[in-house]
Image: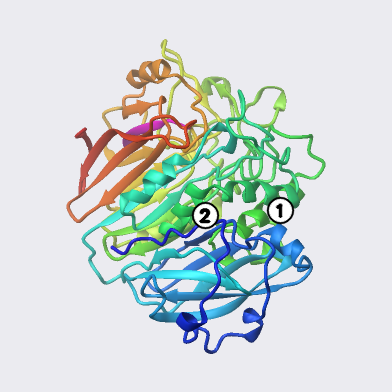
Amino acid sequence: MPKLCTHSFTRRQILQAVTSSIALIGLSKTVWSKQNWASEPFTMGVASGSPTSDSVVLWTRLDPVAIEAAGLSQQSVPVAWQLSSDEQFSQIVAQGVVQAPPGLAHSVHAELSGLAPDHHYFYRFIAGAASSPTGRTRTFPEATRSPKRLRLAYASCQQWGNGFYSAYRHMREENLDVVMFLGDYMYEYPSSRPKDIRPTTGGWATTLASYRQRYALHKSDLDLQAMHAAAPWFITWDDHEVQNDYAGTLPGNSGRPETDFMARRHAAYQAFYEHMPVRRANFEALITNRGDNARVFGSSAFGQLATLYTLDTRQFRDLQACNSNNRPGSSKLDPGTCASWNQPQRTLLGQEQESWLRRQFETSRSQWNVIGQQTVLGPRNFDTKGGTQLSNDGWDGYPQARQRLIDAMIQTKLRNPVVLGGDIHENWVGHILSDYSLPTSRKVGVEFCGTAITSLAHNSQEKVNAMLPVNPHFVYANAEYRGYGIAEFTPTGMSATLRAVDDATNPHSGVRTLAQFTVESDQPSIKRVR
């Protein structure tokens, strides 16, 4: 495997005419004007995402300080992109110019198509005299092919002030095909609790300008930049990209009192688009002010081996049930005291997404069906003394919607469903049951809900140890460590490895394996092997 280029992200790089003259043929002369930057314009690095068998999205954003110093704040800036088969860019296979418009924070989205399937590429951006760091991406195998392996990482929840992103430094060594990021890329809070390990600048994120600033803060992390540059990502959101515990069009419970929550949500969704390697068509109505919704759910096939799905459990959900005094946000309660808990029409995904997902299941011919979504799927009863106490914010608070998802898996005969999750800042590993009220009911699939990159656990290890016996569909839980998960799929089985940093407050932390599990193909039973 070619080694990823490791240029400094803070030093301006000048194109050398003798090595790049061939690559510049056919590109707009405006890109190659003598625009000399007073400071580095590519401080947020590069990223790629949304891969298919013949396409991928390349991303960067020009630094606002560099833009202002150059007098370009109100102008679109032409940015060239280059795609090469080699890291030295001696074999350019595609190139072009896109505009970085001021209305989209001078972000760059180059949507490439017609690429060779199952192929690795190197890419970079060029603006005036400056060249970006080099990124590495890949396309997926064609639907008719039978690849031998898919190796992915799943991650979530990276509150800036809770720690450092050393997990990504170790993730780079994992030889990945793709990363699935499952929500809470950034947090709207002005600081962390109990205290910031590193300062969270900018106060509450509530406006387009403040969301942009918060993303720029996160994007300044060099370990995160390097992981984005190492492999393509699929990215979905959860609540903190907007506001803690918001539900569809209704506010959650953090920040100043809302005067216009939908204006805040609209701004947050636009900022998400501006900072992620996602497709414009899914955000077109939103960023052109013709609507308030965007689409982050989707799927992509990795040959016949696997289909990867990303879901959206925030944008289209019903309000959380039975909060006392009708307060916004989430709470834990006994479902027996809540008349609306089991109402059949309550939804977490929304009708359109539910229908889309069922159609996807009906047409899937993949051996593995990997569903990346925001949180834990199976019930988690927090009452360890014989009662019932469930959270109303995740799937537990929408039990009929969860059952429709499981029934869709069963009725469509979906092969090897694997659900990946985040949100809860703890590792939970378990079986998906046809009827969770009957612990001996049929095992339909498996789930691996991952811990956080940095965000703090809500429970102690003693608490989750006590919870496991009253939640027998789970086989493992850990609240002590933060990190990420690695899932590897082959024609005969899959493995899931839970990786944990020793100390998320140490930017140079080491990493360890907490546990490893295997699942045989067409046998949805988890075996712990480490």
- The single residue placed furthest to the left in the displayed view is 492
Earlier residue among tags 1 and 2: 1
Q: Position of residue 161 (x, y in %)?
A: 59, 34
Q: Give the x, y percent position of residue 245.
A: 62, 36
Q: Is residue 389 magenta?
A: no
Q: Residue at x 61, y 26 (%)?
A: 193
Query: In screen coordinates, is 125 left or right of 204?
Result: left
Q: Is residue 109 left or right of residue 504?
A: right
What's the residue type where badge 1 is placed?
His
Mark 2 residue type: Gln
- The stretch in magenta equals 425-432
Q: Is residue 426 magenta?
A: yes
- Residue with the mark numbered 2: 353
Residue extending furthest toward the top: 385
Q: CA distance from mark 1 to mark 2?
A: 20 Å
- Viewer-closest of 69 and 362: 69
Q: Which quarter shows the N terminus?
A: bottom left
x and y, in percent, of residue 332 in the image: 55, 23
Give the SS element for disc 1: helix
Residue at 55% over, 64% down:
59
Circle 1 is placed at which residue position?
A: 266
Residue 44 in view in this figure: yes
